[in-house]
Image (cartoon, rainbow, N blue to C red):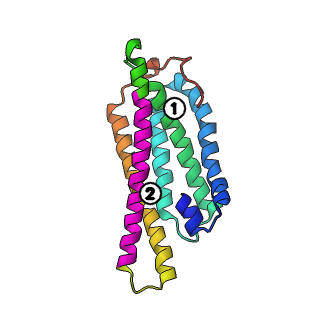
Amino acid sequence: MTFYFQITMGYTPLESGFAFLPFSLGVIGAAGFVSNLLPRIGPMPIMIPGLALTIVGMLMLTQITEDTSYWGFVLPSLLLMSIGMAGVFITASSTSLVGIGTHDAGVASALLNTSQQVGGSLGTALLNTLYAGAVTAYLTDHVGESPKTATGNAFVHGYHIAFFWGAMLLTVSLLVAVFLMNAKKEDVPADAVAPA
């Protein structure tokens, strides 16, 4: 979103930070709610809708243009993603140690943390690479257009490609959760869920 806010929308770095702030606040607010809800209803009723909300928010961003309204379109998509991600992160963290003995809990917790850090880094690198490749391909294919028009369209095309593939990766995660996640409500200790 930084590229979109600063390059396409012309926001300053400070304005871009403020534009992204509702996403962070959404994660924080939803995390507190999810932390209280998880022991009562279990992980599946939170994880699946959380992934679905994140996918919908990301797919919404495949429709952005140079003229898209922040308040009417970008902000709602960011809020959907933030609420969904809070559900995913809290649930994943709380259920990652299900079935792990106390003697292996430290290693399992470290593995979860490492996996999240590596996954986030690789995901960001992959989506940025897809973005850059799509921008380059668009510019190569539209040499005859005016530079200003081609550049703006190329950036938007890059956003669409990156957000689409981000949504597809999340869809794979959703399928994995549906078919492989076996943690139940009883597996989540009532006092083990701390707000993020």
Q: Main secondary structure of the magenta part?
A: helix
Q: Residue at x 43, y 65 (%)?
A: 158
Q: Quadrant of residue 145?
A: bottom left
Q: Is residue 50 above or below residue 124?
A: above
Q: Residue at x 37, y 18 (%)?
A: 99
Region rendered in magenta: 111-140
Q: Please give the label number shown on residue 160.
A: none
Q: Quadrant of residue 154?
A: bottom left
Q: The N terminus is located in which quarter?
A: bottom right
Task: Give, as a three-letter code, the residue at label 2.
Answer: Phe
Judging by the rendered image, the residue that carries numbered circle 1 is 90
Q: Quadrant of residue 163?
A: bottom left
Q: In the rendering, at what x and y percent does residue 100 appear?
A: 37, 18
Neighbourhood count class around disc 2 (C-alpha, 10 Å): few under 14, some 14–19, many 20 upward? many
Q: CA distance from mark 2 to mark 1?
A: 23 Å
Query: Depth check: 159 or 75 in front?
Result: 159
Task: Give, as a three-letter code, the residue at label 1.
Answer: Ile
Q: The C terminus is located in which quarter?
A: top right
Q: In the rendering, at what x and y percent does residue 68 appear?
A: 58, 67
The reply to whether the magenta stretch includes residue 113 is: yes
* Secondary-structure class at tag 2: helix
What number of labels is visible?
2
Q: Residue at x 67, y 59 (%)?
A: 15
Q: Is residue 100 visible?
A: yes
Q: Please give the label number shown on residue 163.
A: 2
Q: In the rendering, at what x and y percent does residue 67 appear?
A: 58, 71
Q: Residue at x 36, y 30 (%)?
A: 181
Q: In the rendering, at what x and y percent does residue 83 appear?
A: 56, 42
The reply to whether the magenta stretch includes residue 179 is: no
